[in-house]
Amino acid sequence: MWIKDGPSLMITAENLTKRYGRNLSPALKDVSFQIDDGEIVGFAGLNGSGKTTTLRIISGIIVPTSGSVKIDGNDIVREKIAASSNLAIVPELPNFDITQKAIPLLRYYAGFYGMQREEANQRIETLLKNFGIWEYRNRKLRTYSQGMKKRFAIASALLSDPKNILFDETLNGLDPEGVRNIRNLMLEQKKQGKAVFLSSHILSELQNIADRVIIIKKGSIVKILDRSDIPNLGASSIRIMVSNPDSKINEILEQYGTVQQSGSEIQITDLKVSSEKAKLLNGELAKSGYIVTKYDLSGEGLEEYFLSLVRDSYE
Ligand SMILES: Nc1ncnc2c1ncn2[C@@H]1O[C@H](COP(=O)(O)OP(=O)(O)OP(=O)(O)O)[C@@H](O)[C@H]1O
Ligand SMILES: [Mg+2]
């Protein structure tokens, strides 16, 4: 895969292959991609497809069998300190010491980043307040709910204000308010020019947030979707019957896609709109005085589309 060169590149993964054991089939096979500054890239795949393996290789927790990763131009294996200095990962499963309380643990982490005590205290207070953990600061992390642990993990990843952030299944397990907050946070990071990489096993979770979505199946990239592609996936055509069509009906229909009309039967293909929007056509026609006697939206939903890409053909 073509990798462009240049100073603005934040994360580059080139030909990553990972074998966990000589007799095991590779968990990753020749995976290459890049994440630019100010870009949010989604990483979608089923359980066991290699998402966590990729994120762990990028963050330098494990080494690839072959291939390389560069963070701001620094190799994560050979120039580990420089590469890691601007990188953080929010792991799939919390990996912090749950016998601790939030503030002392974050102060301990701040020590690694060489933060001054006052600066650290201020940043910790702001983060804990932003993530709704401040009121629980006197409780041990062990007593936190799953979502609170996740919030804490995100807060600790952001402590050093890293330029590159990896989120492994972070939206999964959060309540709707948490999902909204984290989405906003990611958009905020993007605005600041940071590179964000976010894995998920649900494609729709990445919709409206990721600029691109890389889809992985059994360790190989099978597709890279652009943000603008995603709303149109799933639905493929609308068939309607209108008992009183006239010459003006096309003004409405053409907003939805390519119109083919034969008498009262109309088919719209190459949809320009999302499945959600397509469902509104019926109402829009009725409002304009048309009598719709049949309405069929055919095609698959976004998740069915995703499954058709990633599931095994024999299933
Ligand atoms: N430490 C390990 N030793 C051996 N095999 C491993 C190890 N870690 C992961 N694997 C295997 O590598 C493959 C990819 O696993 P990985 O955890 O990267 O998937 P994932 O996409 O993150 O899945 P999930 O959605 O379940 O988190 C799987 O087949 C898994 O069994
Ligand atoms: Mg995983």
Image (cartoon, rainbow, N blue to C red):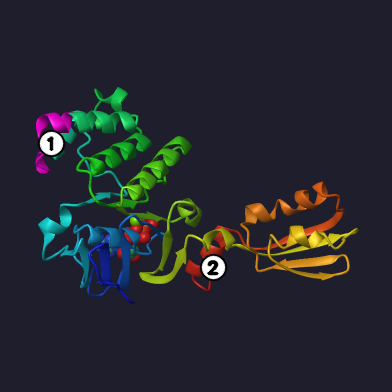
Image: 5 above or below 91: below
Closest to the camera, between mark 1 and mark 2, is 1
Cα distance in 3D space between marks 1 and 2:
46 Å
Image side of residue 18 versus residue 203, left or right: left
Which residue is found at the position 10% from the left and 38% from the top? 111
Q: Main secondary structure of the magenta part?
A: helix
Image side of residue 55 versus residue 210, left or right: left
Q: Is mark 2 within 8 Å of ligand 1?
A: no
Q: Quadrant of residue 10?
A: bottom left
Which residue is found at the position 46% from the left and 65% from the top? 225
Residue 48 at x, y = what percent? Answer: 37, 62
Magenta region, residue range: 111-121
Which residue is found at the position 10% from the left and 31% from the top? 117
Ligand 2: give its quadrant.
Answer: bottom left
Residue at image mark 2: 308
Residue at image mark 1: 108
Image side of residue 244 versus residue 314, left or right: right
SS for dot 1: helix
Residue found at the far right of this picture? 244
